[in-house]
Image (cartoon, grey):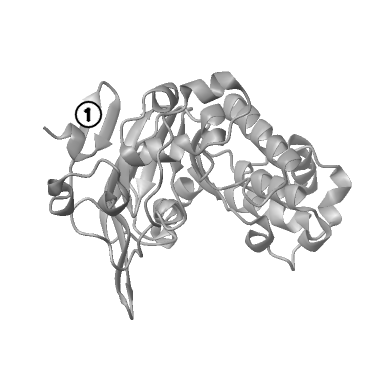
Amino acid sequence: MSVKNLKRHFSTPSGKVKAVDGISFSVAREETFGIVGESGSGKSTVAYTIMGIYPPTSGEVIFKGVKLDKSIKKRSRSLRKELQIVFQDPGSSLNPKRSVEQILELPLKVHGTFKGSDYRTGVEELLRMVELPAHYKDRYPRELGGGEKQAVAVARAIATYPSLIVLDEPTSALDVSAQAKVIRMLIQFQKKFHLSYVFITHNLSLMRNVASRVAIMYLGKVCEVASAPEFFTNPLHPYTRMLLSAIPVITSEEENIKPRKVTSIGEIPSPVNVPSGCSFHPRCHRRMEICARVDPVIVEAEKGHTVRCHLYNS
């Protein structure tokens, strides 16, 4: 999948919100592309725009060589089958009036991914894959724990045997043990079904363990993109270094590879009143005079490592 100069703006009584403001990236087959950022950076809007839940203001999403229609309703059934999403809150993404069997049976029927009329067998197979007992098919979402709900949401996503799944903070609402179980299942499914993931989170420690490449977002724009090993050992953007320096660690070895402690200046600005020039400059400890006037362009500072910062625009 290729995302090219994607924008999604919202009009509000207070002004225009540039939730996503011209981002570009690609996702290869069987790759996990991580998108990280603070609340309000635009991560989830990227997910919803890719899926067609929000129509883009401009830009395009190309999947397997096909430019996707702006609205999910206009996309072909075969494309909708290939692209799936797991939402952050399984409690609100599962229909409370439907049983687990009804929730999982629907994609099997719509997309014909289970051969045969006995869809109950297909539902039981999906539950087995996400390590839930077969009798859970008769339960309703209110009768499940948070981890069990998210397991059902994952089962619903893989029911169509997609090529790419957008994971919008799939573990942030779960306790630690449930998080570990969901991550382990996602890794197993990726290998088994040759899946690609767009993994959205605010958890940098999680990205270190699951992502192939990582992109950092700030106020609707991408600051830096690099392979996961390069990202954590050689961060370039001041914002990236600030985030990495704040990661809690356990061992002295981990402490030694962290960037020197960078103190944050202020809070993330309102997306309605984005600062001029580089949007990060009011908080940047390395800001220059040009930063307040000119928005930097993204450049390849090193092979496969891009950054949007005036420190590297010379």
In this view, 194 is above or below 116: above
**What percent of the width, then of the height, locates residue 242?**
40, 40
> Residue 116 placed where, x, y %?
72, 42
Number of other residues with Cα within 10 Å of mark 1, as a class: few under 14, some 14 to 19, many 20 or more? some
Viewer-side residue, 229 vs 128: 229
Residue 26 picture quarter: top left
Amino acid type of the residue that numbered disc 1 sits on in the rendered structure:
Glu
Provide the residue designation for mark 1.
300
Dividing the picture into quadrants, the one containing residue 14 is bottom left
Left or right: 11 as drawn, with respect to 106: left
Tell me if residue 306 can be seen: yes
Q: Is residue 194 visible?
A: no
Tell me: residue 141, above or below residue 288. Answer: below
Residue at the bottom extreme, as displayed: 13
Q: Position of residue 192 (x, y in %)?
A: 62, 25
Residue 310 is left or right of residue 253, and the answer is left
Look at 40% across and 29% down and name the residue there.
Answer: 28
Give the quadrant of the N terminus: top left
Q: Is residue 241 left or right of residue 296?
A: right
Q: Residue furthest top?
A: 253
Q: How many marks?
A: 1
The quadrant holding residue 3 is: top left
> Along the line of sight, which residue is nearer the eye, 98 or 14?
14
> SS class of the residue under badge 1?
strand
